[in-house]
Amino acid sequence: MQESKIIDAKVIVTCPGRNFVTLKIATSDGIYGVGDGTLNGRELAVSAYLQEHVIPCLLGRDPDRIEDTWQYLYRGAYWRRGPVTMAAIAAVDMALWDIKAKRANMPLYQLLGGRCREHVTVYSHTNGHDIPELLDSVAKHIELGYKAIRVQCAIPGVPDAYGVPHGDKPYEPADSGIPREEVWSTPKYLNFAPKMIEAVRTKFGPDLPLLHDAHHRLTPIEAAALGKSLEDFRLFWLEDATPAEDQQAFRLIRQHTTTPLAVGEVFNSIFDCQQLISERLIDYIRASLTHAGGITHMRRIASFADLYSVRTGCHGPTDVSPICMGAALHFDLSVPNFGIQEHMPHSAQTDEVFPHAYTFNNGYMHPGERSGHGVDIDEKLAARFPHKRMYLPIARLEDGTLHNW
Ligand code: CS2
Ligand code: MG
């Protein structure tokens, strides 16, 4: 293959409803690739990291040396890991894989070893301000074809519970202004959660895969109690039962319950889940391509997880861009120990800014057959939506103590 060099790289920050950070890399043979570096609430930190520290080192490099570039940006920086660094490396990595697959004139999944399955099973988000509203939302998503469903609900006395629409807006965790404050009560949640899951299980029968996200709010023993109380309802997974940085906490949860556990949307490195995987403390690893160093690093995490029967369940919220979604679908199609993929559809405006080849059909997604990862950015349209400062909410207990959101 003809030799090629990186001749240009630029960061595009756009806000079609929410902020996205995109890196676009161009090569001397007239090809370009795009990567996602979005870090919800801290987007400009990644943008500056790329602009000021990464792009100057990329110019002149061979775009085909993806692993070497990954190592160069990871080891070469001396300061390793962390969400900002790893999102920046991910953006470079995704763009380089996009370029390599375009040069090979293949959809990315072919370069990753070809497909291991026909399509990618995704789960959707359902929610309600009360149980009847949640049941309606589940029915609606089953009608849309979804084969697996995440259920969240407002809790009596805790109206702003995680995962529930705020007012009449759809569930979108990012607001302008300073961070919105929500009130949280673990006792009320622990009392309500089994009733909510039971209601869904009773109405929709034993076969529907059900997922639930506790969003880091419990202590290990509370998480263990919740897992135990949900065993009869056979969850597909209980997600983020306790703050994810304490790997040993999962040992305690595991000792008490057989409810399958998923964690890792905030992870940015294989070292964040080394113990969780090697001690078989979890069942699904939730890291995303954007937050865990791109395709190169996620493949390493998945191969390691495969040794211990841990499967993938990539984070796929609306706060990573369609570029991450597209690249994730190529990864999902090609990785042997795939579990499930999260799917939160982007707004029509976001989809317009990021035209893509991937499709949703009857509960399954497919990355499409376009060469590269199949997602692009319409720069002219993106320029019409300048960055807006936005934050995730924060949570406080009823007495005002700051808690995990
Ligand atoms: C969530 C996310 O998708 C999920 O499971 O936990 O919505 C998470 O809250 C956001 O990605 C935070 O930016
Ligand atoms: Mg989550």
Image: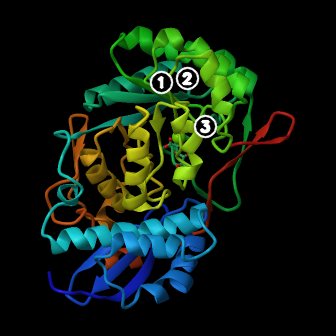
Q: Which residue is mark 2?
A: 130
Q: CA distance from mark 2 to mark 3?
A: 19 Å
* Amino acid type shown at disc 3: His
- Find numbered disc 2 in the image and state the secondary structure of the residue it sits on: loop
- Find numbered disc 3 in the image and state the secondary structure of the residue it sits on: loop
* Amino acid type shown at disc 1: Glu
Are discs 2 and 3 less than 8 Å apart at CB?
Answer: no
Q: Residue at x 84, y 41 (%)?
A: 401
Question: Would you say 182 lies left or right of 36 here?
Answer: right
Question: Is residue 312 at least partly visible in the picture?
Answer: no
Work out whether residue 197 or residue 307 is closer to the camera in this orientation and state it.
Answer: 307
Question: Which quadrant of the view contains residue 142?
Answer: top left
Q: CA distance from mark 3 to mark 1?
A: 21 Å
Q: Nearer the viewer, mark 2 or mark 3?
A: 3
Sequence-first tag of 2 and 3 = 2
Are discs 3 and 1 less than 8 Å apart at CB?
Answer: no
Judge the density around disc 2: few (<14), some (14-19), many (≥20) Cα neighbours within 10 Å: some
Q: Which residue is mark 1?
A: 133
User: Residue 353, relative to residue 50: is it above or below?
Assistant: above
Q: Which residue is mark 3?
A: 215
Q: How many marks?
A: 3
Are discs 1 and 2 less than 8 Å apart at CB?
Answer: yes
* Amino acid type shown at disc 2: Asp
Relative image position of residue 260 (x, y in whole percent)? 49, 24
Question: Would you say 192 lies left or right of 126 here?
Answer: right
Question: Is residue 352 at least partly visible in the picture?
Answer: yes
- Find numbered disc 1 in the image and state the secondary structure of the residue it sits on: helix
Question: Which quadrant of the view contains residue 83?
Answer: bottom right
